[in-house]
Amino acid sequence: MHTFLHGRDLIGDLDFSKEEVETVLDVAFDLKRKRALNELTPYLRDKVLAMLFFFSSTRTRGSFEAGMAHLGGHAAFIESRTTQISHGDTPKE
């Protein structure tokens, strides 16, 4: 079965069908295999992930930074206390 996942978010296990979950896992296993073989996987080249944390999370930050680096992208870490949010602005602003 052909699955189209572009632009979709995986938040919970009920968001995708069984076939879609299998596709996600197949891609993950392929990326892991390529990493073990030192093959380049620049799928996110020229892409930036902005990470805004309201609570400190070293493991999450490290995991996302490593993942972006492995895929050729860059992760920008922003602490909420260093933004206008700490001065009362809402996240939407």
Image (cartoon, helix red, strand yellow):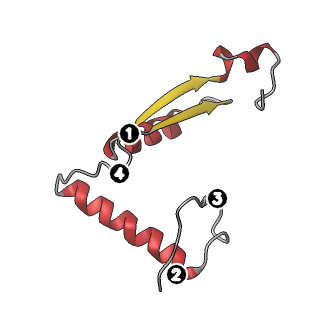
Q: Which of the labelled discs sits on residue 5, or is there none?
A: none
Outermost bottom residue: 1
Asked if labels 1 and 4 touch by Cβ distance under 8 angstroms, the answer is no
The one of 72 and 13 positioned closer to us in this rendering? 72
Q: Which residue is mark 1?
A: 73
Task: Find numbered disc 4 in the image and state the secondary structure of the residue it sits on.
Answer: loop
Q: Which residue is mark 3?
A: 11
Vertical arrangement, residue 31 with respect to residue 74, above or below? below
Residue matched to label 4: 43
**Is disc 3 in contact with disc 2, using a CB cutoff of under 8 Å?**
no
Taking the spot 46% from the left edge, 41% from the top edge, the residue there is 64
Side (left or right) of 7 relative to 67: right
Kindly identify the amino acid type of the residue bearing the numbered disc 4. Answer: Tyr
Cα–Cα span, label 4 and label 2: 23 Å
Whole-percent x and y of residue 75?
Answer: 45, 33
Look at label 2 and name its amino acid.
Glu
| Of pointers 4 and 1, the one earlier in the residue sequence | 4
Q: Secondary structure at mark 1?
A: loop
The amino acid pointed to by label 3 is Ile
* Among the two numbered marks 1 and 3 on one chain, the one whose residue lies closer to the N terminus: 3
Vertical position of residue 33 compared to residue 71: above or below: below
Q: CB under 8 Å between callouts 1 and 2?
A: no
